[in-house]
Image: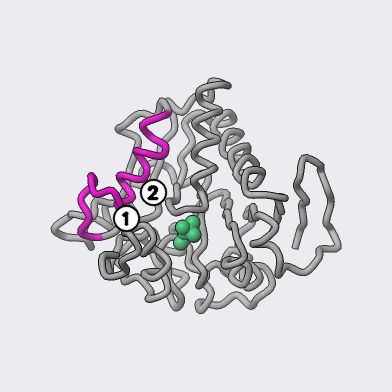
Amino acid sequence: MKVIVADEYEIMSREAAKIVAAEVRNKPDCIFALPTGGTVFGLYEELIRMHREEGLDFSGVSTFNLDEYIGLPPDHPSSYHYYMYERFFNHVNISRDRIRIPNALAEDPEGESVAYEWAIKRAGGIDLAVLGIGRNGHIGFNEPRTEFGSVTRPIYLAKRTIEANARFFGGDSDSVPRQAISMGIRTIMNSRRIVLLASGTEKSRAINQTVHGPVTDTVPSSVLQLHPDCTLILDKEAACELEPSANGFVPGSGTKTMVY
Ligand code: PGA
């Protein structure tokens, strides 16, 4: 597992954007899995800047979001539909018919999940999955004790996730939906490449367990140790509980790269 530790949040965001941009340039019709959450605000800002100033062309790209809250309409300001259009899609030249986010209003969330999983397969599979991480090690909304073999399906949010996400609902945890549709661990692990971003000391324990801990379903992100091409991009705070790596090197520009 490769770990890039950035001196600060902005550098972390730029490093992640460089990887996304390289994927788009190498394979203009590439397929992404995309996250939401506070950690990736800077990543989306940097990608928009690259589109405007450097002509980064998203016209052939397809995207599948990792998850969406069940019951929130797309125009709800706390929905992930709203987040994605406001923070990214409305500002780049991505084709609207290549954007997929789980339909949280589907009458049959199970059926919607099966269709979503098939749509990923039909598209040819995910080239690059970009992930955040929960304080409990969740990836997507795959909370502790999710089976590693899981695919896209309706899930219940963990209490810690509801509390952490209350900040996107005016601080009111009662307003946070209890269920979501999420890609599964297997869906994510089938991606050809994975990049996970984490920022802040509140993520440092989960990051320690992701890198050094046993591979266990009590820390879903620990499964990433088994992926052949996974990179963590962290700020110093999120990396503060990592042990030094014998293979560390400093490529410059405020980052350090370690291999575990
Ligand atoms: P955050 O969420 O970026 O808002 O911390 C990440 C996640 O829960 O996966």
Left/right of residue 134 with respect to residue 81 in the rendered view: right
Q: Which residues are magenta?
A: 70-91
Residue 68's mark? 1
Question: From the Cβ of disc 2, is ligand 1 less than 8 Å away?
Answer: no
In the image, is residue 72 part of the stretch drawn in magenta?
yes
**Distance between the Cα atoms at labels 1 and 2?**
8 Å
From what the image shows, is residue 14 above or below residue 229? above
**Camera-side residue: 227 or 8?**
8
In the rendered image, the quadrant that contains the C terminus is bottom right
- Left or right, 215 with respect to 101, comes to right
Residue lying furthest left: 107
Kind of residue at disc 1: Glu
Are dots 1 and 2 in contact, CB under 8 Å?
A: yes
- Residue at (51% x, 22% y) in the render: 52
Q: Circle 2 is placed at which residue position?
A: 65
Q: Disc 2 on helix, strand or loop?
A: strand
Q: Position of residue 106 (x, y in %)?
A: 17, 55
Q: Residues within 10 Å of mark 1 (few under 14, many from 20)?
A: many
In the image, residue 42 lies at what x, y percent?
Answer: 54, 43
SS for dot 1: strand
With respect to residue 255, does 204 lie above or below?
below
Amino acid residing under circle 2: Asn
Is 223 within the magenta?
A: no
Q: Residue at x 52, y 34 (%)?
A: 47
Q: What x and y, as percent, mark residue 64?
A: 38, 46
Q: Residue at x 31, y 71 (%)?
A: 156
